[in-house]
Image: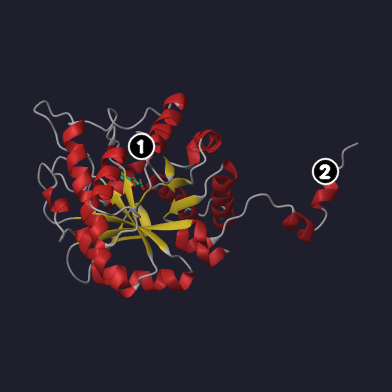
Amino acid sequence: MTRLRRLRKNDSIRNMLQESRIQISDFVYPLFVIEGNNIKNEIKSMPDVYQMSIDNVLRECEVLKKLGISHIILFGIPSIKDSIGSSALSSNSIIATAVRAIKERFDDMIISVDLCFCEYTDHGHCGILDSNGNVDNDKTLEILARQAVILADSGADIIAPSAMMDGQVKAIRDSLDSSNFINTLIMSYSTKFASAFYGPFRDVANSAPSFGDRKTYQQNPSNRNEAIRESLIDESEGADILMVKPALNYLDIVRDIRETSLLPLAVYNVSGEYAMLRAAKNAELIDYERMLLEIMISFKRAGANIIISYHSKEVANLI
Ligand code: PBG
C-alpha cells in the first residue's frame, strides 16, 4: 500500500513538502490615478479600492513599502477625453506625471504602466476608430508606440500593453528600442479574454465603451488554442512577461501557457473576482482569509510567477 498519509504527518513535514508558495514579491498592486488634489474616491463595487490623486498615491506608496509591496501598476483617469485619447500622448499626461512623482520619492518602486486608450477616449474603445466605428488596428499601433516612449521616458520600468491590437508588442518594442529605452520591459496582456469580470474596473477607470463591446479585439472565453497562440505571438514579438487575464476561471490556460513558453507569466486577478469575494465576505458567507489565500496559491500552482491583485495589501498582512 502507498502511504501518502505519512507525508502529511505534521506541520514541519507538510511545510517541507509544500510545492507552491506565495511571497509578497510575487504581487503587483493596481493604482488608479486621477487628476486633481487630495482626491480619494472609493468605488462602490470594490471596497478599499480608490481613485486617487497623485498626493494620495504617494501616501499609498508609503503604505505599500511598509507592507513589502514594491511593484505597482498604474491606470490613468484623465479629466479630458477625446476621440483619439490625446491626453495620453503628452509628457504631462496623468500617468507620466505620476510616474515621475513616484520615482522621485520611491526610486526602488517597480512601476508598470497599463498601456491602452480606453481610459482616454470619449468613446471608451481601446484605440482610434475608423469611419465605420471599428477600432483601426494599425493607426492605434502608432499611438500605442508613442505613449510607450512617453511613459518609458518618465521612468516607467515596465510597459503593460492591454489594448489587444495585433502587432502591438512589436510596435512598442521597436519604438522603445529606437528611442534607446532598450531596458524597459514589456509585460504584455498577452491572453486577455472578453470578460464580464472587468465590470467593476470600468466603473473605477470610467472606461466602459459607450457603444458595442470589445469582442473583436479581446478573446472568446471558449477558445483554448487561440488563447495559447495569442501569448506565443506576443513572445515572438519580444514580450518579456506574458499574462493571462482574468485569472480565476482561466487557470487551465495559465497551465497551458506555462507549458508552452519559458517566459515569466503573470495573472491578473481582476476587479470582478475581487468584487465577488469581498461581497461574499461582507455577507458573512465565507471564511474570507482562508479562501483568499487558497485562491492565491492556486495561481502559483497553475504556473503563474506574478500576481496582479487588488488583494495584495491583504495578502501582505496575512503572510
Ligand atoms: C484596459 C484594461 C482593463 C482592465 C485592465 N486594463 C479593462 C478592459 O479591458 O475592459 C481590467 C482590469 C480589471 O478588471 O481589474 N485598459
Residue 16, quarter of picture: bottom right
User: Considering only vertical position in the picture, is 84 above or below 293?
Assistant: above
Is label 2 or label 1 in front? Answer: 1
- Residue 313: horizontal and vertical position, in percent? 46, 63
Q: Nearer the viewer, residue 38 or 54?
A: 54
Q: Residue at x 91, y 36 (%)?
A: 1
Q: Residue at x 24, y 46 (%)?
A: 175
The crowding category of the residue bearing disc 1, from other C-alpha atoms within 10 Å (few below 14, some 14 to 19, many at least 20), is some
Residue 118: tell me if it is visible: no
- Residue 85: horizontal and vertical position, in percent? 14, 46
Dividing the image into four quarters, tell me where ligand 1 lies.
Answer: top left
Q: Amino acid at mark 1?
A: Glu
SS at circle 2: helix
- Residue 14: horizontal and vertical position, in percent? 75, 55
Considering the image in quadrants, where does the C terminus appear? bottom right
Residue 141, quarter of picture: top left
SS at circle 1: helix
Q: What is the spatial separation of the Cα atoms under label 2 and label 1, in whole angstroms?
A: 45 Å
Q: How many marks?
A: 2
Q: Amino acid at mark 2?
A: Leu
Q: Are marks 2 and 1 in contact (CB under 8 Å)?
A: no
Query: What residue occupies the far right of the structure in this picture?
Result: 1
Q: Residue at x 38, y 60 (%)?
A: 72
Residue 93, quarter of picture: bottom left
The residue that label 1 is drawn on is 237
